Image: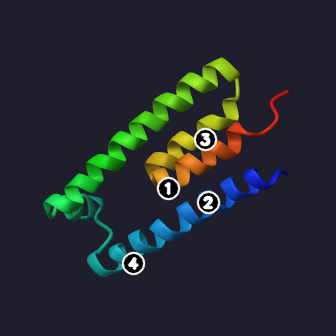
Amino acid sequence: MSLIRLIYLALAVAGAIIPMRHFVAWFMENGWSLSGMIDAWFVNRATEGLVWDLTIAAITLTVWILVETVVRRNWLALFAIPATYCIGVSCGLPLYLFLRTRRID
C-alpha cells in the first residue's frame, strides 16, 4: 500500500474516532436524544454556520462520489457516502480518497 493511501486511511480513522468521542460524550451528558443534538447544532450563529458549511461540503462530496463511481465503476467507493452522513465529512472524504486510489480491476 502506498504512503498516500496510508495517510488517507489514517485520516479516515481519525475522522471517525475524534468526532465520535465528542458525540458520545455529549450523549452521555445530555441523554441519547438525536433531536437534542440537532437543537444544539443551532444554538448560535457560529455553530449554525459550521453546520451549513459541513452540510454543503457533505452534499458536494456525495455528488462527486456518485459521478466518479459511475464513471470509474468503483462501487466500493460508495461506502464513503454513509460514512459522511453517519460520522462526518472528516471521515467520509479521506475514506473516499482511500477507496478512490485503490487499483480497480
Reading the image, the residue beneath label 4 is 25
Q: Residue at x 39, y 78 (%)?
A: 25
Sequence-wise, which precedes: disc 1 or disc 3?
3
Residue 3, given in percent of the width and then of the height, sits at 79, 55
Q: Secondary structure at mark 3?
A: helix
Kindly identify the residue that appears in the image at 23 percent across and 61 percent down: 47
For badge 3, the amino acid type reads Phe
Frontmost of labels 2 and 4 is: 2
- From this view, report whether residue 73 is shown above or below residue 78: above
How far apart marks 1 and 3 lie (CA) works out to 14 Å
Q: Which residue is mark 2?
A: 11
Give yes or no for contact between labels 2 and 1 (Cβ–Cβ under 8 Å).
Answer: yes
The image shows residue 55, relative to residue 105, as above or below, that is below
Up-down relation of residue 23 to residue 63 (above or below): below
Measure the alpha-carbon separation of dots 2 and 1: 8 Å
Name the element at disc 1: helix
Task: State left or right for residue 4 relative to residue 29.
Answer: right
Whether label 2 touches label 4, CB < 8 Å: no
45 to the left or right of 24: left
Q: Amino acid at mark 4?
A: Ala
Q: Residue furthest front?
A: 3
Q: Position of residue 96 (x, y in %)?
A: 61, 42
Residues at discs 4 and 3 in contact (Cβ within 8 Å): no
User: Pointer 3: what residue?
Assistant: 79
At 47% from the left and 50% from the top, the residue drawn is: 89
Mark 4 or mark 1: which comes first in sequence?
Answer: 4
